[in-house]
């Protein structure tokens, strides 16, 4: 008796999207109704920026990955329907950004993401 295949999250696609500056590749990892809650210096934990749906998420990814900066996936851990990853970024002037994400998957794709960013000040 066989077992049904369950979709799994593709960490290699995540790396290619982040390090290759390809928002389309990253967007392929999200559910149509996905939600990102972003906390950073401008969006506090009490008032995070919330992006809902692939259009809003795609616009944010296009903005971020079109900037003149480097992006590196530092670490990615996948356990069942949960993913955590660290991304480091650097602008040409040396300003650095660190992003930590905790993700909930549905059918192998991102349904919810909490992203916390810390910037050099």
Image (spheres, rainbow, N blue to C red):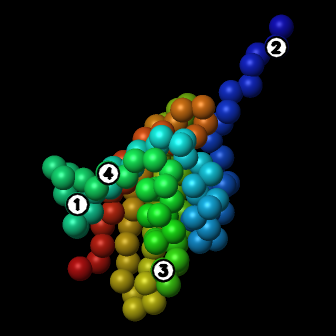
Q: Residue furthest bottom?
A: 93
Please tell me whether mark 4 sits on a helix, a strand or a loop: strand
**Would residue 5 be visible to someone looking at this image?**
yes
Instruction: Sort mark 2 into few (<14), some (14-19) or many (20+) by Cα contacts within 10 Å.
Output: few
Mark 2 or mark 4, which has the lower sequence index?
Answer: 2
Please tell me whether mark 2 sits on a helix, a strand or a loop: loop
Please tell me whether mark 1 sits on a helix, a strand or a loop: loop
Separation (CA) of disc 3 from disc 4: 21 Å
The residue singled out by tag 1 in the image is 43
The residue singled out by tag 4 in the image is 50
Mark 2 or mark 1, which has the lower sequence index?
Answer: 2
Q: Residue furthest right?
A: 1
Asked whether the residues under the numbered discs 2 and 4 touch, taking CB atoms below 8 Å apart as contact, a structural biologist would say: no
**Would residue 103 be visible to someone looking at this image?**
no
Q: Is residue 83 above or below residue 45?
A: above
Q: Residue at x 45, y 90 (%)?
A: 92
Mark 3 or mark 4, which has the lower sequence index?
Answer: 4
Mark 1 or mark 3, which has the lower sequence index?
Answer: 1
Q: Residue at x 27, y 63 (%)?
A: 40
How far across and how far down the image is residue 23, in percent? Answer: 57, 64
* Residue 80, image quadrant: top right
The residue singled out by tag 2 in the image is 2
Q: Given this view, does label 2 or label 1 mark the residue nearer the observer?
A: 1
Mark 1 or mark 4, which has the lower sequence index?
Answer: 1
């Amino acid at each position: 008796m066989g077992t049904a295949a369950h979709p799994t999250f593709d960490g290699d696609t995540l790396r290619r999207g982040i390090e290759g500056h390809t928002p389309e590749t990253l967007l392929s990892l999200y559910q149509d109704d996905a939600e990102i809650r972003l906390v950073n210096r401008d969006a506090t934990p009490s008032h995070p920026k919330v992006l809902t749906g692939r259009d809003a998420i795609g616009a944010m990814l296009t903005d971020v990955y079109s900037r003149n900066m480097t992006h590196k996936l530092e670490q990615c851990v996948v356990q069942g329907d949960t993913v955590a990853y660290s991304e480091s970024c650097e602008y040409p002037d040396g300003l650095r950004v660190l992003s930590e994400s905790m993700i909930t998957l549905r059918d192998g794709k991102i349904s919810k993401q909490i992203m916390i960013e810390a910037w050099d000040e």
